[in-house]
Every structure is written in structure tokens, then in C-alpha cells.
Image (cartoon, grey):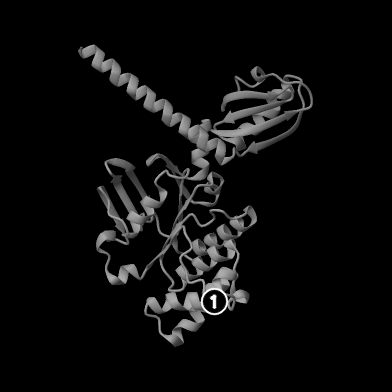
Amino acid sequence: MTTAPSEPIISARGVSRAFDGRLVVDGLSFDVQPGTILGIVGPSGSGKTTTVRMLTGTLGRTDGEIRVLGEDPRRFSRRTRGRIAYMPQLFSLYEDLSAQENVGFVAALYGIGPFKRRPLIRRALEVVDLHDARHRLARDLSGGMQRRLELACALVHSPDVLFIDEPTAGIDPLLRQAIWDELRVLRGEGRTLLVTTQYVAEAEYCDRVAMIVDGQLVALDTPDQLRKVVFGGEVIEVNAQQDVEPQMLGTLEGVLAVRQTSPRRLMVTATDAATVGPRIIEGLRRAGVAVAGLEEHQPTFDEVFTGLVEQQRTRREQEAADAGAVVTGHG
């Protein structure tokens, strides 16, 4: 028996936002399924924060439809707003309060009474590894600890959906990894997360990735599928024990493209790495070339993002050329 797909927790259809006549977000459409992480990835100024503000109801939209937990964010019920948390990009807590007091203050805003509040505060601080620093003033915490404190404040009322804007901006790589580890733990507990980041490599941590440039959606899929979109398949790195030629593999079944990166190294794009790998080894053996190593190559997301942007630019240029040809033809 097949299970019916669940309704998306977050749904956006043709969402746009203009400021002074300029489109900052242009026709975004996507869904976020329960218990998953959607990463909205793009350079600074691409419309990520504007998108999050529209999804949380703190900013109106110019066009399109949004549903979060089945409701329009502009008209959230009190109950639905209590199921949502928003962690903004800029630190916005009270510097003169301790970490524990900051989390307690937010819990009180959500109407959590003093007796229920204490274990929830402890739990939230433990999740982000700040319980030992609970008595330190917020202003005395490092930048990374402040971001984790904001996450604790967002978690204290046990929300079902978290909107997290640039959680790792300006933080060193080790702390970035720690924050993403925490976000994935939350996902594992069944929460749904929408996370924005300007660090393209962080797409790897998400279940699905929406890449946006200049307010437009460039691609939306799983990390693995986005690699396939750019490279046409799975990439295999082949290291031979002697010089090797790309044409030795060109006719093998499942091989889509072969690129030589050094006299003894080939990058092979294949329909499926697991089935094509053994064929590569056998094909080179028949050609008198021994394989020293063969492994699936994971292109970096910087490469993937660059490839997607180039594809988008090519499509726009082709559409412009086609439109010009139509105008000329009618002239």
C-alpha cells in the first residue's frame, strides 16, 4: 500500500516583492515538506531575507500566494504564530541580560508560566551547548555563542516550524559546522526548517536547496540532483597507472562525457557511478591501461552554483535572441 504524500508545511506560489518599482523577489515558487530542511542559498542581496520576512508575515508581498501551516502569514492565528519561530540575521537580544535570562524573557513572551519555563529554558540552552554559559551576559558572549543563544530563544517554545536567516554569517567554519549539526538534530526531531545562507557550500547540509540570484529561482532540488543537473550525471574520477586517453572510454555504455585533467587522470560523467565504474576498469584494462584508483567525485557547491548561474544566463540570452528574432520576423 502506498502512502499519500503529506501536505507541505510551507508553500509559495509566484511570490514577488517590489520596492520603489524594483522587483527584489521575482515569482518564487516552492514547497517545504514536514520534517525537512529547505536551504535558500544565494549571494548577499539576492532576496533571501525579504523572502523569509514575507513567509513569516513581517513583510507584505506584492504578488503571489503563501501558506504556512495552512494559513496566510498576513493573517496568522495566535495558535499558528505560536507554532513558528523566526531567528533574524542580526543579533536582537538584550545584552545586559544573561543567556538564561534572555531565553526566559522570550519564553514569557510566549505565555509560558514560571514553573513550566525552567525545564524548557534548560533544554533550549543544552541543545545549543550553552547551558554552562547560562549566567554570562549576552554582551560577553562571542559572536558564535550569540548566534547559538538566538537559536535557543527561537527553540524555547518548541515550535514546529523554524525560519532561520543567515545563522552562520560572519562565523568561523568550525562554528558553522556546529550550528548546522544543531539544525540537523532539530530536523531529526521532526521540526521543519527553512534556512537562508550566502555560503553556497552549506547547501550540502539541506534536504532540498532553492538557489536564487537577483530574486529569481535558479534551481530547486536535492543536493545530489542539483549536481546532476549541472554535470549531466554522476562524476567519476579515474586515476591510471600510465598515460590515458579520453577516447578509450568514449564508447562505453553509460558514459556520457570524458574530460582529461592530467595525463593520467580522467573525469568521467556517467549515468550511474556504481554500474559504470566496473565497466571503466574493464575498458581500460582491455586498452592496456591499469587503474590506480577510481572514486565518485563530489563537485563542490561553488562549482554547482556557478554552473547553474551560467545555465540561467544562457537561457536568458537565448530567450532574448528568440524574442528579437520574432520581432524582426514580424517587422
Q: Above or below — where is 37 with respect to 268?
A: below
Residue 21 located left or right of residue 133: left
Query: Between 218 and 290, which is closer to the camera in this rendering?
Result: 218
Label 1, residues with CA under 10 Å away: few <14, some 14-19, many ≥20: some
- Figure quadrant of residue 218: top left
Query: Between 184 and 53, which is closer to the camera in this rendering?
Result: 53
Q: Above or below — where is 318 with respect to 19?
A: above
Q: Could you say where residue 195 lies in the image, as x and y percent from the top left?
A: 46, 55
Q: Could you say where residue 7 lies in the image, as x and y percent from the top left?
A: 33, 57
Residue 99 located left or right of residue 243: left
User: In this rendering, does residue 31 appear at all?
Assistant: yes
Q: How many marks?
A: 1
Residue 273 located left or right of residue 151: right
Q: What residue is disc 1 on?
A: 98
User: In this rendering, does residue 8 appear at all?
Assistant: no
Q: Could you say where residue 224 lies in the image, as x and y percent from the top left?
A: 52, 42
Of helix, strand and loop, which one carries label 1?
Answer: loop
Image quarter in which the N terminus is found: bottom left
Residue depicted at x 70% and y 29%: 281
> Which residue, as the protein is rendered here, is positioned at the far left?
330
Residue depicted at x 41% and y 49%: 48
Amino acid type of the residue tagged 1 in the rendering:
Ser
Query: Between 138 and 207, which is closer to the camera in this rendering?
Result: 138
Q: Could you say where residue 223 lies in the image, as x and y percent from the top left?
A: 51, 44
Residue depicted at x 67% and y 19%: 248
